[in-house]
Image (tube, helix red, strand yellow):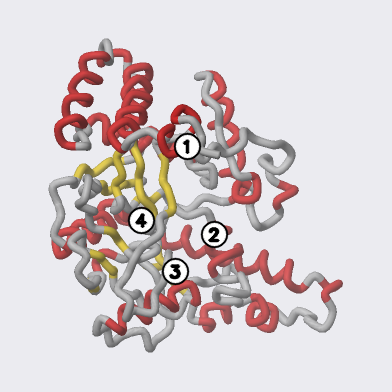
């Protein structure tokens, strides 16, 4: 039986223009509400409507880009460090479209964020998608990643497919991978040494720890997510805060599908690994995390510990509640992966995630040339 026109799902779906306009209206009204000095939003909405009707899209003002990027961080349900969302440095690089220039600005992003070790939160917003014209994207998971990290396997394969000759030594920084918006093959760019501040890992009480030859970089700049603001998608928008120690000590270096270093640390400290009831994994994990915090302190590089950051997050929750705003949070990401029950964030629940909430950072499906082994990010 044929559905009547009013019940036809295809006819009920908004057009592309209607979807953009609906999202734009929500954003413009939010922007005006949180920035009272901008005045009545109706004039701006009329401008946006005219642009969308003519071009199928519209251009944000620099102030709107900055506000949208900061609110996207505020909405990031998996981030514990959102207390400082309004201090995000926003680099408006929408005019930068060539892969060479995008790579150069990504390296400048790292220099600005590193700041001699006093890490600054930064986002670099490159050109948005437009109807029928996808913009350039970054295929790298972060602006800095090591080639011997198991998470890098597919991207290293892609880089070698493109002609990269590296990746043979431990903790070697892999190149930045840029996918041109034209659909051409990706291009790779070696990350300059002066753009990457690395920290050699030592232990405050065990001189032999340095013999493990471990190190990590200072700026965790995520580059494989799109920034969505008011119906506009910015597919290249790398952003960073600063590390919390457990991200490196409990996940990057300890996870069995990453560097899996707990057995080596246990052996170094002479722990009895024959029985799980000796809690050798727990003890090794504490020593590894202690080494990370100690090393970053010694190097003068910003790093949060999980107890302090937990208290800061609850301060963020309280502040947002005073403004009448929900705080979406993924409990499994907010509670630290070390001594979770001893942290302030463990003993409560949070506002649920809203997958439709915008502005937001959104994981994307990345298309790559068929001959490359790297799949969806």
Query: Which residue corresponds to mark 3?
Result: 216
Q: Are marks 1 and 3 in contact (CB under 8 Å)?
A: no
Image quadrant holding the C terminus, namely: bottom left
Residue at horizontal 46%, vertical 27%? 6
Residue at horizontal 25%, vertical 20%? 45
Query: Which residue corresponds to mark 4?
Result: 117
Neighbor class of circle 4 (other Cα within 10 Å; few <14, some 14-19, many 20+) is: many
Numbered label attached to residue 9: 1
Q: Earlier in the sequence, mark 1 or mark 3?
A: 1
Query: How far apart are the two marked residues, 2 and 3, measured between alpha carbons?
Result: 11 Å
Instruction: Choose mark 4 or mark 1, whichever is in front.
Output: 1
Nearest the eye: 365 or 171: 365
Nearest the eye: 226 or 166: 226
**Side of 191 relative to 13 (left or right):** left
Q: Earlier in the sequence, mark 1 or mark 2?
A: 1
Q: Are marks 4 and 2 in contact (CB under 8 Å)?
A: no
């Amino acid at each position: 039986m044929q559905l009547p026109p009013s019940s036809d799902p295809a006819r009920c779906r908004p057009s592309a223009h209607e979807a953009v306009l609906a999202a734009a209206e929500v954003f413009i009204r939010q922007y005006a509400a949180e920035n009272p000095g901008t005045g009545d939003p109706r004039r701006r909405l009329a401008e946006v409507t005219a642009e969308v009707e003519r071009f199928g899209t519209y251009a944000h003002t620099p102030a709107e880009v900055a506000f949208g990027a900061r609110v996207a961080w505020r909405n990031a349900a998996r981030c514990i460090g959102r207390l400082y969302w309004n201090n995000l440095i926003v680099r408006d690089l929408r005019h930068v479209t060539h892969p060479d220039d995008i790579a150069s600005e990504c390296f400048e992003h790292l220099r600005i964020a590193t700041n001699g070790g006093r890490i600054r939160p930064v986002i670099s917003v490159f050109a948005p998608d437009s109807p029928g014209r996808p913009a350039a994207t970054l295929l790298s998971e972060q602006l800095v990643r090591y080639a011997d990290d198991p998470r890098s396997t597919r991207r290293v394969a892609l880089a070698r497919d493109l002609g990269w000759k590296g990746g043979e030594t431990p903790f070697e920084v892999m190149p930045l991978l840029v996918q041109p918006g034209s659909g051409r093959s990706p291009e790779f760019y070696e990350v300059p040494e002066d753009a990457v501040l690395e920290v050699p890992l030592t232990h405050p009480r065990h001189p032999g720890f340095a013999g493990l030859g471990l190190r990590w970089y200072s700026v965790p700049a995520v580059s494989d997510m799109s920034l969505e603001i008011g119906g506009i998608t910015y597919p290249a928008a790398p952003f960073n805060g600063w590390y919390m120690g457990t991200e490196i000590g409990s996940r990057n270096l300890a996870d069995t599908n990453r560097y899996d270093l707990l057995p080596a640390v246990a052996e170094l400290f002479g722990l009895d690994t024959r029985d799980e009831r000796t809690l050798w994994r727990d003890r090794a994990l504490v020593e590894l995390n202690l080494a990370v915090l100690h090393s970053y302190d010694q190097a003068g590089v910003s790093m949060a510990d999980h107890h302090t950051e937990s208290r800061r997050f609850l301060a963020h929750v309280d502040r947002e509640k005073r403004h009448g705003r929900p705080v979406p949070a993924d409990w499994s990401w907010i509670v630290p992966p070390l001594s979770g029950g001893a942290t302030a964030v463990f003993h409560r629940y949070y506002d649920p995630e809203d997958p439709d909430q915008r502005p937001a950072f959104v994981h994307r499906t990345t298309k790559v040339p068929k001959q490359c082994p790297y799949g969806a990010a």
